[in-house]
Amino acid sequence: MATRKRSPRAPTGATATATAPPADTDAAPAGGPAASPPARQPITVNDLWQMERVGPPSLSPDGAQAVVAVQRFSMDENLGRTRLWLLSTLGGAPRALTSGDKDTEPAWSPRGDRIAFLSRREQEGSKDEEAQLYLIAPDGGEARRVTSRAGGIEAFKWFPDGRRIAFIAWVWPDERGSEAQARRHQAWKDRKTSGYVTSEPLYRFWDHHLPQDRVPHLHLLNLDDGSVTDLFEGTPCELSRTEPTASGFDISPDGRRIVFAFNPAPEKRIDGRQALYEIELDGARLAGAPRAIVQDEAWDCHSPRYSPAAADGSERVAFIASHQGIKHTMPQQLAVWERESGRWQVESAAWDHDVEAPLHWEDDGQALLFGAEERGARHLWRFDLPDQRAERVHAGGWVGGFDKVAGTVALALDTLDHPPQILALLPGEPPRRIEAFNDALLARLALGRNEVLQVTGARGDAVQVRLVFPPDFDPARRWPVVHTIHGGPHAAFGDNWHWRWNHHLLAAAGQVVACVNYHGSSGFGHAFADSITHRWGELELQDIEAASDWLLAQPWADPQRLYATGGSYGGYMVAWMNGHVPAGRYAAYVCHAGCFDWTAMFADDAYDWYAKELGAWYWDDPARIAAQSPHSRAGHMSTPTLVIHGALDYRVPDAQGLAYYNTLKARRVDARLLWFPDENHWVLKPANSRLWYEEFQAWLSSHVLAPAQTPAVMVGTKRLAATKTTAARSRRKPV
Ligand SMILES: CSCC[C@H](NC=O)C(=O)N[C@@H](CC(C)C)C(=O)N[C@@H](Cc1ccccc1)C(=O)O
């Protein structure tokens, strides 16, 4: 989808300065030779927070080793620590490379002699206030700080020569030179006022205000002499203000050009369309003005990648393009620009998938690797350019970051049953794990099975439902059933591990968890995703209700204990359900960061999107907006609801949750509020997460429908009389 997923700063929760314990202390307790292994136990929230969180791999130039950042949390200290590990793709043992607390985003230099990473450290008498760039030799030793930039470094990329690095940092565009920037930064820090002043339409994002009056510029750091050049100084160019990541630019194989995504409109908006611009370098200086190589107002273009050096000197740039001029839901397609002709074309037009960054060229320049969702999985794909055909390089689970060097692929993969793990794919060999970070912990956990089925949902379409069962599930008993409704709406709950909505943890409480990939979900083709446009709530509810009908027809489902929960758009859906589904069907709801009132949602950071999604601006067609807004049905709401919200949530401001909670209270509906002053759209701190899971479960467990409350059955959005209940349920069979 063109609505790219948000990019909050690293969701690491709190951090610490103390020395991290060794990351390999998860060893199983020693037992005597005759001791039988302890029985596996259901997963707890403490288990979840003890797991190591492995980041995306970066490979050495020979492909023999990968470097990853690994985060480990302490529930007692309520903080997380991240350090770097080296993993062998050839079978050697993993090795801790750093002992810092905040070492992230490692990248192996193209010469193999150094690894660059971002960190905040106390070193040589100075303490980093913001992330700075560090270098370390792969065989260890002390890391060396190579930048000391007021305001810090956002992201970086090695030049192919391994002697220079391009990095992104925020600057005041009206200042010249690093000294002037540093002076301005000091003045900013010393100011006595706290007001944020802006005339920009886009001024805050996710959970932070954009640095006032600053823009993200690309800089060149020469590691030989330490000199830094602002490559955009004196130009109108800048990188994405909301996602200033290394995906936004690329360096040509000869190191003489840089291509980057840039929105040339004077006013930057969250849905602004980016063009591709290129600069030429003469040493550390710009040779000429930046020039647009791909610019079409109808298209949003981003994530450019230069093709590898070719014997004939030809050069191309692959990128992701979305035809926003047609519709905001248009897919993200693979496109290629050719230097010789100066023309570009979409390559994946006939392939109904959303291509996701980063793109990675194969060495022969004939194909690209990338991740893309398909029916609740995120595979790694190779897209062959001459044939315009995609094949799976790794199928199943959820592929996160990956790298490919010298024929070896290293990828981060998670599944519903396993947190992210690192796999190596060597030519002609099956995929192989190259770490064992969570194995000892997982070995003592009992995880229930999961299965995928289809129900006939809205418009008679097949809708995917994934069920996760408690570890001790016995179909002869009756079990509570809880919907976890995903957000987006253009996202999916698939075969992936979730830290915040962990389906095994929820199932371990003794309930069957149901995840419906309702109309609008990603991974099921463009028409399915677009089907809900301008009528949010309608088809999604029919799908969830169809799944509920199927679930209630199962002998193991307890009709007195059917629940619906969801976050963000999933929270919108449960608020919508409260107004549209008759009381007595669901015993309780949990609404996390849910949208309650689309007009008041104009206070959020993505307000420019909603006219496209809902079909009008609220001032042009208030009735249309109100018809898709849960608050319009407040008079029908009577199902008990736990409302959860974070005050740092700028995507769905907490006033949404508070208005919903206050409405329920004013209506004397059973309701409870869990409000976090220090969490954003997501609950990311260990102790808060534990409270979240505890309150979530306690709320569900304390709400059971009385047997006299005959569950009503919804067909479409019409209510059926109770006498038709049995017949209506029996019509819904899994497909
Ligand atoms: C119409 S702008 C929506 C932007 C974004 N969509 C990406 O999926 C989003 O933030 N959606 C919200 C709901 C929206 C405010 C109505 C949402 O549901 N967020 C979910 C899904 C999500 C997951 C990962 C990254 C971004 C969004 C959530 O935060 O869990």
Image (cartoon, rainbow, N blue to C red):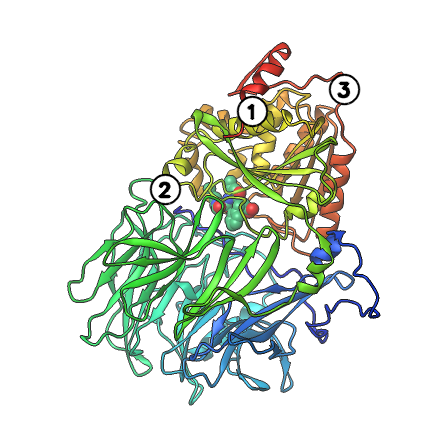
Q: Amino acid at mark 2?
A: His
Q: Can you tell me whether the CB of the residue at mark 2 lies under 8 Å from the nearest atom of ligand 1?
A: no
Q: Are marks 1 and 2 in contact (CB under 8 Å)?
A: no
Q: Residues within 10 Å of mark 2 (few under 14, many from 20)?
A: some
Q: Amino acid at mark 1?
A: Ser
Residue 328, labelled with which disc? 2
> Is 318 in front, or is 437?
437
Q: Is residue 146 above or below residue 585?
A: below
Q: Residue at x 73, y 35 (%)?
A: 700
Q: Residue at x 77, y 35 (%)?
A: 701
Q: Are marks 3 and 1 in contact (CB under 8 Å)?
A: no
The first of marks 1 and 2 along the sequence is 2
Q: Amino acid at mark 3?
A: Pro
Q: Residues within 10 Å of mark 1 (few under 14, many from 20)?
A: some
| Residue assigned mark 3 | 707
Q: Residues within 10 Å of mark 3 (few under 14, many from 20)?
A: few
Nearer to us: label 1 or label 2: 2
> Is 16 in front, or is 718?
718
Nearer to us: label 3 or label 2: 3
Residue 612 in sight here: no
Residue 241 at x, y percent in the picture: 44, 59
| Alpha carbon distance from label 3 to label 1 | 30 Å
Residue 372 at x, y percent in the picture: 42, 52
Residue 289 at x, y percent in the picture: 25, 70
Residue found at the far front of this picture: 34
Q: Residue at x 65, y 78 (%)?
A: 99
| Alpha carbon distance from label 1 to label 2 | 26 Å
Residue 632, labelled with which disc? 1
